[in-house]
Image (cartoon, grey):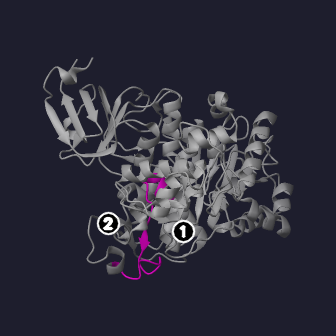
Amino acid sequence: MSTGTMTKPDIVLTGRKVVGGVAEGEALVTRDTISGWGGVNAMTGTVIESRHELRGQSFAGKILVFPGAKGSSGWSAVFHMARLAGMAPIAMVFNVMTTKAALGAVVMRVPAVTDLDRDPLDLIETGDRVCVDGDLGVVKIWKNAS
Amino acid sequence: MVTLTSEEQAMLGGEQGAGVGKAMELLVRYADALGAERFVETNNVAGVPGSAHPWLKNYYKEDGGDYRAVFSKFDLDSDEVVDVPRMNAYSCHLQGGMDPELWAEQGMTPEAHENFMSDERETAAHGIQILKTCTPYIAGNVPVMGEHCAWMESSAVVFCNSVIGGRTNCEGRESTSAAMLAKRIPDWGFHRDDYRLGQNRVKVTMPVEDVFDWGMLGYFVGDVVQDTIPVIEGPIAKASLIRHKHFGAAAASSGGVEMYHMVGITPEASSLERAFGGAPRGETFVYDMAERKRIYEMLNAVGESTDVDYVMLGCPHYSIEQIAHAAHLIEGRKVHANSALWVFTSRAVKATADANGYTKILKDAGALLMTDTCSAISQAVPKGTKVAALDSAKQVHYLPAMMGIEGWYGTTEECIDAACTSKWKGRLA
């Protein structure tokens, strides 16, 4: 499934490494900030927050593209539990750096990138194929990849 | 990459033992993720170290499934299990999963209680203070202005930064557990002067005086400024610990506010210019009668039936002033047969409530004074609860959604009345 080595990406964004490593997969995009404790079920990798646009959807195995983390200080522990349960995202791309998002990315041990040169929420849609290169701080996007 | 002092380099190399070494390893990964250039020293850490649900212990079964395994592999995110020494920093355990005595009333099993007690013995043995509260600042840990802290618990973080002028980010379980051993936390965010300046302005155009109104203003502020730092000005009166406690918890829940300035009230906001570090910037939001009504309706959006079967007070944990008030309101009355009243506080405050006779007054009325936890943290409500009444904007934000129940927000008086009549009669005066 490694599109990255085969075709040229439609869009390439450059930012800053949060956590290193490379992962490629399908994007799940939201314009809503994400709560950990009380907002996510770690055992199913599902968003449970009332009125959240991803409510009922799972981020397990996806590349999670979101504005940033909010809510309880239990954020990292909930996403850490999701990793143990095999329900974590495989990479994260986000706009606003917080201690919650940074620590969450660290203990999830997934590639993560922030401070991109263009807004990923404008350029990535759910279902796009995305490659996150945490080491280089690069996000490659293939539109309409299905 | 974060720059280490020679002492930090030595810690990372294991010179203070494998536990401190693993703690530094995690803190270096965390500092690099944030983009921090150095660490600050901290000797005031509040977290939830080592406490574990049986699921987590079972997950680490092959590593021993004990406190040591959980602390190494989960708290320190270490690939190997190491010896966990007594903590080096002044460390406190925040809220936990159940009341140490009234756990059966909360619906907990003897096995869950034994797990809780076993974790608590380990916590104490590692030199971590058993405060067991979301309000460490009224249970024995009061920071001072400028003190570098590493705290979890969003309502405590916002209180520390805003009301006291202490300095902490909203830390997580892993970073606080590591900081307890390494006495370090990344020099980022609220540890730095420029980060603490206001970003948006809130003009309050109506008097805000009682605790109920301070809570609604807090919920409004978080809703409009999200996770930025607001500078709030206007006729805000009667500033006190319980008002700030409710305001901050509400703002941290609806938005994610980790610090706020109130001009002429909070310590880093002697003037508008001081709070912003110059001219006001960002957006200006106005809180008026119409917004107050909108917030009240938002907080009561999950209330439909007026048949209240549960009243919960103590989010954040009640202070002794609030317990005295609740006891005064209920003395001589009885909790209705179709309702229940649980009041939550810390063990330290409960000791005072016991001495003052408040615990007995509540008990005689059919209410229970509980410690350590709350209904949201423990996910424990009286059996069969369908409709809860709450005097906390934060609790009404979380509890109904988590438990799939209805919820009402009102004053403490309205909540006590609901407990004694089983009917919700709250309204916006």
- Indicate the position of residue B46 as horizontal and vertical percent values: 60, 58
User: Is B265 situated above or below B15?
Assistant: below
Find out whether the residues at labels 2 and 1 contact each other: C-beta distance under 8 Å. no
Three-letter code, disc 2: Gln
Look at the image and give the residue range highlighted in magenta. B250-272
User: Is B363 situated above or below A113?
Assistant: below
- Indicate the position of residue B131 as horizontal and vertical percent values: 70, 59
Total of numbered circles in the picture?
A: 2
Residue B244, labelled with which disc? 1
Secondary structure of the residue carrying tag 1 is helix
Q: Residue at x 20, y 40 (%)?
A: A122
Residue corresponding to mark 2: B199
Q: Is residue B15 left or right of residue A54?
A: right
Which chain letter matches label 2? B
Q: Residue at x 22, y 17 (%)?
A: A146
- Indicate the position of residue B185 as horizontal and vertical percent values: 48, 59
Q: Earlier in the sequence, mark 2 or mark 1?
A: 2
Q: Nearer the viewer, residue B77 or B94?
A: B77
Residue B261 is at least partly visible in this image: yes
Is B258 colored magenta in this rendering?
yes
